[in-house]
C-alpha cells in the first residue's frame, strides 16, 4: 500500500435530481434560499409545497426491490445543504455530457430569462459547467453562451450608468 488516494477508495456518488427537473436542479446547485430568490437567507421562505412536488418527480419510475443495476443513490430534496452543492470535480465528473449541457442551459435560463442575480455560487456553476462541456459545442450551446454574455454586458452597463460618475 503506497498511501496514494486511489487505493481502493472511490468517490461517493451524489444523488442528483432528474434531468428535466429544473426546480430540483436549482435547489440542488444553489440551495433552498437562493433558489427561492433569497440569497444569503435574509428572510423566511415558505415553500412547503415544493418538496412534495419535487419528491414525487424525483422518485418517478424507480422501483424498490428487484431493480437490478440501481446503484445510484436516490435524490431527496430535503438532503440538499443550505447553500446547495458546490460544483466539485467529483460531482461534475459524475454528470454525463447530455446532463452537463442541460444543466448549463438551466443556469442560462435562470440568469437570462428569469432575471436571477449572478451570485458567486451561480457564477461558479456556470464556469464549471462550461469547463466540463466537451468541444465542439452544438449551436444551442453557442447561442446560450452568446445570450449569457449579452445579458452580463447589459447588466454591467446598467451598473455603470446607475453608478456615480468616476471622472
Image: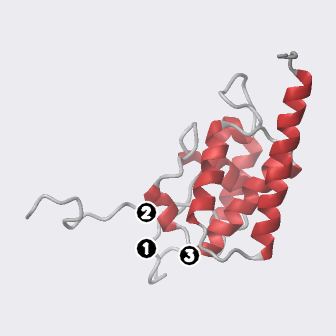
Which residue corresponds to mark 2? 13
Residue receiving disc 3: 63
Write down the residue under mark 1: 71
| Residue occupying image coordinates x 51% and y 73% | 64
Q: Within 10 Å of the Cα at label 2, are there few (<14), some (14-19), or many (20+) other Cα atoms?
A: few
Question: Is 115 on the left-hand or right-hand side of 36?
Answer: right
Q: Nearer the viewer, mark 1 or mark 3?
A: 1
Image-quadrant location for residue 53: bottom right
Residue in the image at 77% along x and 55% along y:
108
Q: CA gap, disc 1 to disc 3? A: 12 Å
Rendering coords of residue 50 (x, y %)? 74, 47
**How dense is the environment of label 3, judged by Cα within 10 Å: few (below 14), some, or many (20 and up)?**
few
Q: What secondary structure is found at the residue carrying circle 3?
A: loop
Q: Nearer the viewer, mark 1 or mark 2?
A: 2
Q: Quadrant of the N terminus?
A: bottom left
Label 2 and label 3: CA atoms lie apart by: 19 Å
Label 1 vs 3, first from the N-terminus: 3
Q: Which of marks 2 and 1 precedes in the sequence?
A: 2
Q: Which mark is residue 57?
A: none
Expressed as whole percent of the image width and height from the top left, the position of residue 36 reads 75, 39
- The 10 Å Cα crowd at callout 1, few under 14, some 14 to 19, many 20 or more, is few
Q: Nearer the viewer, mark 2 or mark 3?
A: 2
Q: Is residue 61 left or right of residue 167?
A: left
**Residue 14 in sight from this viewpoint:** no
Evaluate if marks 1 and 2 touch, with contact meaning CB atoms under 8 Å apart.
Answer: yes
Residue in the foreground of this view, choosing between 158 and 27: 158
Amino acid at each position: 500500500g503506497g498511501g496514494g488516494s486511489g487505493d481502493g477508495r472511490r468517490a461517493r456518488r451524489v444523488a442528483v435530481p432528474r434531468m428535466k427537473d429544473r426546480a430540483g436542479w436549482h435547489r440542488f446547485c444553489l440551495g433552498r434560499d437562493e433558489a427561492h430568490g433569497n440569497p444569503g437567507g435574509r428572510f423566511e421562505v415558505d415553500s412547503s409545497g415544493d418538496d412534495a412536488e419535487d419528491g414525487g418527480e424525483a422518485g418517478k419510475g424507480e422501483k424498490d426491490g428487484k431493480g437490478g443495476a440501481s446503484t445510484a443513490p436516490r435524490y431527496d430534496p430535503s438532503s440538499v445543504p443550505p447553500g446547495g452543492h458546490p460544483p466539485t470535480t467529483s460531482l461534475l465528473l459524475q454528470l454525463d455530457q447530455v446532463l452537463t449541457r442541460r444543466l448549463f442551459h438551466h443556469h442560462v435560463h435562470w440568469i437570462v430569462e428569469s432575471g436571477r442575480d449572478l451570485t458567486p455560487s451561480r457564477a461558479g456553476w456556470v464556469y464549471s459547467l462550461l469547463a466540463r462541456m466537451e468541444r465542439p459545442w452544438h449551436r444551442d450551446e453557442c447561442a446560450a453562451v452568446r445570450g449569457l454574455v449579452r445579458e452580463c454586458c447589459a447588466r454591467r452597463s446598467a451598473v455603470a450608468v446607475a453608478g456615480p460618475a468616476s471622472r
